[in-house]
Image (cartoon, grey):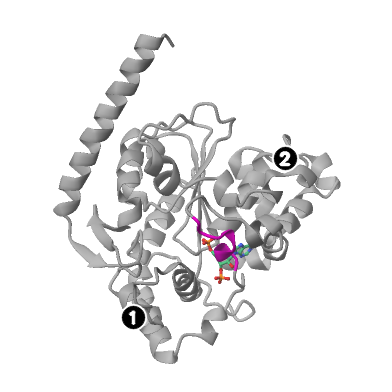
């Protein structure tokens, strides 16, 4: 690009960024809001409770993201196994570029390798250059189906959705926010978090709209939306790795299968292996957040150690109502009981 053209482009982008910031400030003031655990707010935008941290990024992502038909978008409600799914998808898609013994996952947390569209990519820059990433590009988001840019919905790109039973997810979230809470903000109790959940007040929620939005899309477009549950992956990961590879358009060859590549990826991305990598024990994000906050127990059914019967009954009754007639049910949590 010539220097004058380059300068003109930068100037017009800066102008556009300023215009967007103004517009965003005006918009946010018009939205209903509720206090969030971090001392910030959840804003009700297009039916979704957006955390203040990701709001501007979400709007830029909605407006500017240019999808490719070969893109793979990983979508989760927070604390549903996003870190795991990112590691698996990255290892599957990049196995031709790096043997596992040289995988970038050994030195980078999977959130660095598969960034969030709203939290990372568009949060930092409304006009990121995403063109030089080799195909399939893998991105992630917590955005509900209804709020996805129509370019994603209308393209041939693939969506992989992963959810987790709401009881374990809530307990996982409670621990997570306990570690990230600013010292100046009072800790939130499990009772308060259950209450917020039942009022729909979860980041990117209501939770039931999130899971139902993608459930319906997966029923209508099974070739576009792969719907996974954390509990199923914990019971049988090898077949899930194969399904994921097929769905992403990079199936394992017979030779790879014979060599045990599927099992190797499954075990490389296991909780125990990733958790114990130095990068995940001591590494940090540029924001200072520790990589180890994404690894706790990695179990199914841990909710029983934290939630009392009243909390469980309240959440389950509500979920039954919300999921009624959809044909979708969560694994309750005790894997051998389901
Ligand atoms: P727990 O807090 O129940 O242990 P997310 O990645 O969406 O933030 O979800 C975090 C949850 O996934 C945490 O659950 C974490 O321990 C678990 N997790 C992280 N890596 C995992 C892996 N490789 N396999 C299974 N679970 C994993």
Q: Position of residue 51 (x, y in %)?
A: 32, 58
What residue would you read off at disc 2?
95
Which type of secondary structure does the marked residue at label 2 adopt? Answer: loop
Q: Looking at the figure, which quarter contains the N terminus?
A: top left
Q: Is residue 220 visible?
A: no
In the image, the residue with mark 1 has its CB under 8 Å from the nearest atom of ligand 1: no
| Residue 106, image x, y percentages | 71, 50
Q: Which residue is mark 1?
A: 192
Which of marks 2 and 1 precedes in the sequence?
A: 2
* Residue drawn at the location 74% of the way across and 38% of the way down: 98
Name the residue at 64% across, 60% down: 282
Mark 1 vs mark 2, CA separation in Å: 44 Å
Residue 113 bears which disc, if any?
Answer: none
**Quadrant hosting ligand 1:** bottom right
In the rendered image, residue 294 lying in the magenta stretch gets the answer yes
The quadrant where residue 85 appears: bottom right
Residue 55 vs 326, above or below: the answer is above
**Farthest residue, direction front:** 184
Q: Position of residue 304 (x, y in %)?
A: 53, 85
Residue 161 falls left or right of residue 320: right
Residue name at image x 71 percent, y 66 percent: 272
Q: Secondary structure at mark 1?
A: helix
Snapshot quadrant of residue 234: bottom right
* 113 w.r.t. 70: above or below: below
Of 238 and 219, nearer the camera is 238
Residue 281 visible from this viewpoint: yes
Q: Tell me which segment is drawn in magenta.
A: 288-295
- Callout 1–callout 2 Cβ contact below 8 Å: no
- Crowding at dot 2, Cα within 10 Å, few <14 / some 14-19 / many 20+, comes out as some
């Amino acid at each position: 690009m010539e220097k004058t053209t380059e300068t003109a482009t930068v100037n017009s982008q800066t102008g556009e960024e300023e215009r967007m910031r103004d517009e965003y400030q005006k918009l946010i003031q018009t939205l209903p809001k509720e206090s969030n655990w971090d001392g910030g707010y959840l804003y009700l935008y297009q039916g979704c409770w957006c955390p203040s941290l990701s709001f501007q990024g979400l709007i830029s992502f909605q407006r500017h993201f240019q999808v490719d038909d070969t893109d793979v978008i990983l979508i989760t409600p927070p604390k549903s196994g996003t870190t795991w799914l990112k590691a698996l998808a990255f290892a599957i898609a990049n196995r031709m570029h790096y043997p596992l013994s040289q995988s970038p996952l050994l030195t980078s947390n999977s959130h660095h390798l598969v960034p969030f569209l709203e939290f990372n990519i568009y949060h930092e820059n409304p006009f990121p250059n995403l063109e030089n990433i080799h195909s399939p590009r893998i991105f992630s988001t917590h955005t509900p189906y209804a709020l996805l840019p129509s370019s994603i919905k209308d393209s041939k790109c693939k969506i992989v959705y992963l959810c987790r039973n709401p009881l374990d997810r809530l307990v996982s979230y409670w621990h997570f926010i306990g570690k990230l809470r600013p010292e100046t903000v009072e800790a939130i109790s499990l009772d308060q978090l259950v209450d917020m959940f039942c009022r729909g007040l979860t980041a990117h929620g209501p939770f039931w709209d999130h899971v139902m939005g993608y459930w319906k899309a997966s029923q209508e477009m099974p070739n576009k939306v792969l719907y996974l549950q954390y509990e199923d992956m914990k019971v049988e990961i090898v077949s899930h790795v194969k399904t994921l590879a097929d769905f992403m358009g990079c199936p394992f060859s017979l030779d790879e299968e014979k060599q045990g590549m599927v099992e190797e990826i499954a075990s490389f991305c296991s909780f125990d292996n990733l958790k114990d990598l130095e990068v995940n024990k001591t590494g940090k994000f540029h924001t200072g957040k520790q990589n180890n906050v994404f690894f706790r127990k990695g179990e199914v059914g841990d909710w029983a150690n934290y939630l009392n019967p009243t909390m469980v009954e309240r959440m389950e009754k509500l979920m039954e109502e919300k999921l009624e007639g959809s044909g979708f049910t969560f694994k309750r949590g005790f894997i051998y009981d389901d």
